[in-house]
Amino acid sequence: MLEKDKTSPSQMPSSLLSAEERGGAPHPLHLFKFCPECGSPHFVENNAKSKRCQACGFVYYFNPSAATVALIVNERGEWLCVRRAKEPARGTLDLPGGFSDLDETSEEGVCREVEEETGLQVNRLEFLFSLPNRYDYSGFTVHTIDMFYRCYVDDTASARAADDAAELIWMRPEEIRPEQFGLQSIRRGVERLLSGAAFSALK
């Protein structure tokens, strides 16, 4: 269960202080007040990565959620970008992708997300790299690990915007400006993809 934190800074362990007190983003664990196993309010910091229930002994580790990003290039060398239809970063540019579902592989997840957002069927993919990200949703910071894939499709002309994509835009690499991408990891990923060594590998 999530609840607004009412503990004063002097009572909080240093690793769970607010963004202002820590000089950065707050650790999400400070929002978790009750043990998810037994419901006890005696749910305390165990270390910088986990909380422990003093009543039943349950230890909860806060790990990043898995997410995927797809780089799709057409026969003209243009990259498929989407305009985000929803918050966070609504209206900014993005690459197709999203969160992995339970019981699916990362590869299955990126193929599903591409189909949901663009209608395209991925027939082959290659893992490129991964980047950590913070995704703010409904007032809660979701820490993610975003895995970037080069995705190959047969019929790029059939692409259509759907689901979280308000618009699909084919852009030549030289037209792409990383600052137009609203999500931090996507912006960093685009910068990396446009860099010399990475860009040469994509040709």
Image: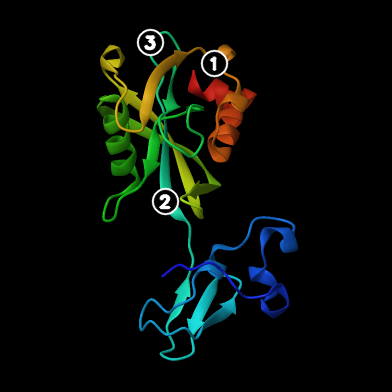
- Give the percent coordinates (x, y) of residue 165: 37, 28
Q: Residues within 10 Å of mark 2 (few under 14, many from 20)?
A: some
Q: Hey, which quadrant is residue 125 in on the image? A: top left
Q: Amino acid at mark 1?
A: Pro
Tell me the element at label 3.
Answer: loop
Residue lying at 55% horizontally and 81% vertically, measured from the top left: 44
Residue 61 lies, in percent from the top left, at 48, 71
Q: Mark 1 or mark 2, which has the lower sequence index? A: 2
In space, the residues marked 3 and 2 are separated at their CA atoms by 30 Å
Examine the rendered structure and indicate whether residue 106 appears above or below residue 51.
Answer: above
Residue 173's label in the rendered image is 1
Query: Mark 3 highlights which residue?
Result: 75
Which residue is labeled 2 in the image? 66
How many residues crowd mark 1 within 10 Å: few (<14), some (14–19), many (20+)?
some
**N-term-proximal mark, 3 vs 2:** 2
Q: Quadrant of residue 71?
A: top left
The residue under the point 67% across, 76% down is: 13
Colour scheme:
rainbow
| Residue type at numbered disc 2 | Ala
Q: In the rendered view, tell whether residue 126 sits above or below residue 139.
A: above
Instruction: Give the secondary structure at mark 2.
Output: strand
Counting from the top left corner in percent of width and height, residue 145 is at 49, 49
- State the CA–CA distance, disc 1 to disc 2: 27 Å
Q: Using the image, determine if residue 185 lies above or below residue 48.
A: above
Q: Nearer the viewer, residue 179 or 87?
A: 87
Which tag is nearer the camera, tag 3 or tag 1? 1
Measure the alpha-carbon separation of dots 3 and 1.
Answer: 13 Å
Looking at the image, the residue that sits furthest to the top is 76
| Left or right of residue 73, residue 46 in this image | right
Identity, as a three-letter code, of the amino acid under mark 3: Glu
Residue at the limit of the structure toward the bottom, as seen here = 55
